[in-house]
Image (cartoon, grey):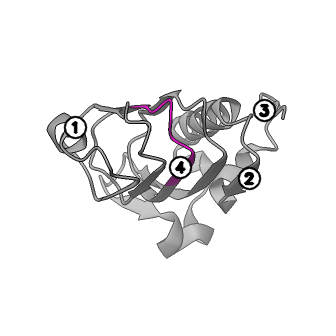
C-alpha cells in the first residue's frame, strides 16, 4: 500500500473495497483528501493514520472490531454507516444486521456488543471536531450509552 500511495502523488480519493492484508494505513500525502473503506476487510486489525485527510467514509459489514483511528485531525466530514456481524459461539455461524436485525439480541453476544460500543465511542471521540457527521443505526444506538460524551 505504501508503494501505491507514494507512486500516486496527485491522488485525491482512495476507495478500498473488501480490503485486507495490511495492519496500518498511513496516508501522509497532503493531496489525498478522501478515503472510502467499504466492505469487511477480513479479520485483520487496522490502524488509520491520515493527518491530512478531510473526508472519511466507513461502510459495509464489520466482523472484527480492531480498527482504530489514530490520527485524523484534519477531517471535516465523516460517515460511519457500517454494521456488525455477531459471531455466535454455539454454532460457529454469524448473523448480519442487514439480514436478521430483529433476530439478533444482545444477550446472544454481550461481550461483542460491548466491544462494538467501545469502538464506536472511540471513533466518535476522535471525530468530535468534524463539521458534518453521518452515522448508521448501529452507531446511533451507541450514542445512548452512559459512557458516551460527544463534544463538538
Q: Earlier in the sequence, mark 2 or mark 3?
A: 2
Q: Residues within 10 Å of mark 2 (few under 14, many from 20)?
A: few
Q: Nearer the viewer, residue 136 or 29?
A: 29
- Helix, strand or loop status at disc 1: helix
In three-dimensional space, the C-alpha distance between marks 2 and 1, rounded to whole angstroms, equals 29 Å
**At 52% from the left edge and 44% from the top edge, which residue is drawn?**
109
Q: Nearer the viewer, residue 88 or 120?
A: 120
Circles 2 and 3: CB distance less than 8 Å?
no
In the picture of the structure, the residue carrying the numbered disc 1 is 6
In three-dimensional space, the C-alpha distance between marks 2 and 3, rounded to whole angstroms, equals 18 Å
In the picture of the structure, the residue carrying the numbered disc 2 is 132
Q: Residues within 10 Å of mark 1 (few under 14, many from 20)?
A: few
In three-dimensional space, the C-alpha distance between marks 4 and 2, rounded to whole angstroms, equals 11 Å
- Helix, strand or loop status at disc 3: loop
Q: Quadrant of the C terminus?
A: top right
Residue 45 forms part of the magenta stretch: no
Give the number of the mark in front: 3 or 1. Answer: 1
Q: Residues within 10 Å of mark 3 (few under 14, many from 20)?
A: some
**At 52% from the left edge and 58% from the top edge, which residue is drawn?**
83
Q: Earlier in the sequence, mark 4 or mark 1?
A: 1
Residue 52 forms part of the magenta stretch: yes
Give the number of the mark in front: 2 or 1. Answer: 1
Q: Quadrant of the N terminus?
A: top left
- Helix, strand or loop status at disc 4: strand
Residue 4, given in percent of the width and then of the height, sits at 18, 44
Residue 81, given in percent of the width and then of the height, sits at 58, 59
In the picture of the structure, the residue carrying the numbered disc 4 is 56
Task: Look at the image and give the residue range highlighted in magenta.
Answer: 48-57
Q: Nearer the viewer, residue 20 or 4?
A: 4
Q: Earlier in the sequence, mark 4 or mark 2?
A: 4
Q: Nearer the viewer, residue 107 or 18?
A: 18
Q: Earlier in the sequence, mark 3 or mark 1?
A: 1
Amino acid at each position: 500500500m505504501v508503494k501505491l500511495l507514494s507512486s500516486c502523488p496527485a491522488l485525491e480519493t482512495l476507495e478500498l473495497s473488501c480490503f485486507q492484508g495490511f495492519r496500518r494505513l498511513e496516508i501522509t500525502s497532503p493531496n489525498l483528501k478522501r478515503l472510502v473503506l467499504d466492505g469487511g476487510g477480513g479479520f485483520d486489525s487496522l490502524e488509520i493514520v491520515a493527518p491530512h485527510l478531510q473526508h472519511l467514509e466507513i461502510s459495509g459489514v464489520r466482523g472484527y472490531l480492531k480498527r482504530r483511528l489514530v490520527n485524523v485531525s484534519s477531517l471535516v466530514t465523516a460517515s460511519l454507516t457500517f454494521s456488525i456481524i455477531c459471531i455466535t459461539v454455539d454454532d460457529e455461524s454469524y448473523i448480519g444486521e442487514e439480514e436478521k436485525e430483529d433476530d439478533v439480541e444482545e444477550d446472544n453476544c454481550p461481550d461483542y456488543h460491548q466491544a462494538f460500543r467501545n469502538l464506536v465511542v472511540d471513533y466518535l471521540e476522535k471525530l468530535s471536531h468534524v463539521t458534518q457527521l453521518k452515522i448508521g443505526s448501529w452507531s446511533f444506538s451507541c450514542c445512548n450509552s452512559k459512557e458516551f460524551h460527544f463534544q463538538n
